[in-house]
């Protein structure tokens, strides 16, 4: 209402609203054309029906019906031409409106980019990146200095550490061997006894391999003797 009032007195109308109003008006006119075409097509069918009915009995009436049919067909053709023109206008307006909205969005995006880059320059960017690289390098140097100075001033004998580690390994192997030689309190069944003997052989074999290269020859002979006893027990 207000838009029409302002347009009547020469006021400036919104281009987007004007385009929408024009498209609505054109589509309403197309609906009227649809109804008109439907009416004319029915009239053509009726005149053709009359001409067929009077083609033999009343040729004058049949001829008149054909004339009316032809006139209606010409009117229908003109109406279809009008339809085509209206549809073209609708398509043109819709395309123009879409292009206008696209340009408006692109203009806003360009303005936003301009605002963002308004306080930026290549020199400022280069300076900022240089500062970041400098601080990153400083942080790496500080981290490296902290990590390398953890044991500064502590005298550590590497040979002593290796000997202590070897003693710990020897103690662990001795504990495994003592656990394997432990005899269960209850009388195991034949199946349990066979399983137990197999487990014991497996433990002794692992212990034997763990001791290989570390124990004196006398210890190796003792282990061989124990293995032979276990094998003999299995054979029984």
Image (spheres, rainbow, N blue to C red):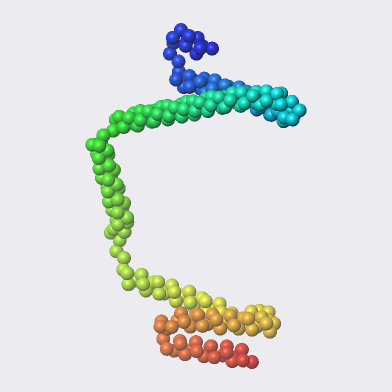
Quadrant in the rendering for residue 50: top right
**Front one among 125 and 74:** 74
Quadrant, the N terminus: top right
Q: Is residue 23 above or below residue 187?
A: above
Q: Along the horizontal axis of the image, is 34 left or right of 49?
A: left
Residue 134 in picture, x, y percent from top left: 25, 45
Q: Is residue 157 above or below residue 37?
A: below
Instruction: Give the residue displayed 53% in from the left and 26% down from the top.
Output: 81
Quadrant in the rendering for residue 125: top left
Q: Is residue 156 above or below residue 81?
A: below
Residue 44 in picture, x, y percent from top left: 66, 27
**Front one among 173 and 74:** 74
Q: Along the horizontal axis of the image, is 152 left or right of 31?
A: left
Residue 59 in picture, x, y percent from top left: 71, 26
User: Which residue is outermost to the top?
Assistant: 9
**Front one among 75 and 84:** 75
Quadrant, the C terminus: bottom right
Instruction: Give the residue displayed 50% in from the left and 9% down from the top.
Output: 5
**Front one among 113 and 6:** 6
Q: Is residue 114 above or below residue 133?
A: above
Q: Is residue 173 visible?
A: yes
Residue 194 in picture, x, y percent from top left: 64, 84
Instruction: Give the residue displayed 69% in from the left and 82% down from the top.
Output: 189
Q: Is residue 87 visible?
A: no
Q: Along the horizontal axis of the image, is 47 left or right of 28?
A: right
């Amino acid at each position: 209402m207000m838009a029409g009032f302002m347009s009547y007195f020469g006021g400036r109308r919104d281009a987007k609203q004007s385009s929408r109003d024009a498209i609505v008006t054109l589509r309403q006119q197309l609906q009227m054309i649809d109804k008109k075409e439907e009416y004319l097509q029915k009239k053509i069918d009726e005149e053709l029906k009359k001409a067929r009915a009077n083609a033999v009995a009343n040729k004058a009436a049949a001829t008149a019906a054909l004339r009316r049919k032809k006139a209606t067909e010409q009117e229908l053709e003109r109406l279809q031409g009008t339809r085509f023109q209206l549809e073209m206008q609708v398509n043109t307006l819709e395309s123009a409106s879409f292009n206008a909205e696209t340009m408006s969005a692109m203009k806003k995006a360009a303005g936003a980019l301009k605002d963002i880059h308004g306080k930026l320059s290549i020199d400022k960017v280069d300076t900022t990146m240089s500062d970041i690289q400098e601080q990153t390098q400083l942080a790496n140097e500080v981290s490296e200095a902290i990590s390398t100075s953890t044991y500064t001033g502590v005298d550590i004998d590497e040979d002593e550490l290796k000997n202590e580690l070897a003693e710990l390994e020897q103690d662990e192997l001795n504990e495994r061997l003592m656990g394997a030689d432990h005899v269960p309190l209850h009388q195991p069944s034949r199946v349990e006894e066979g399983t137990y003997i197999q487990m014991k052989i497996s433990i002794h074999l692992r212990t034997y391999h763990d001791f290989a290269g570390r124990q004196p020859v006398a210890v190796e002979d003792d282990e061989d003797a124990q293995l032979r006893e276990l094998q003999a027990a299995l054979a029984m």
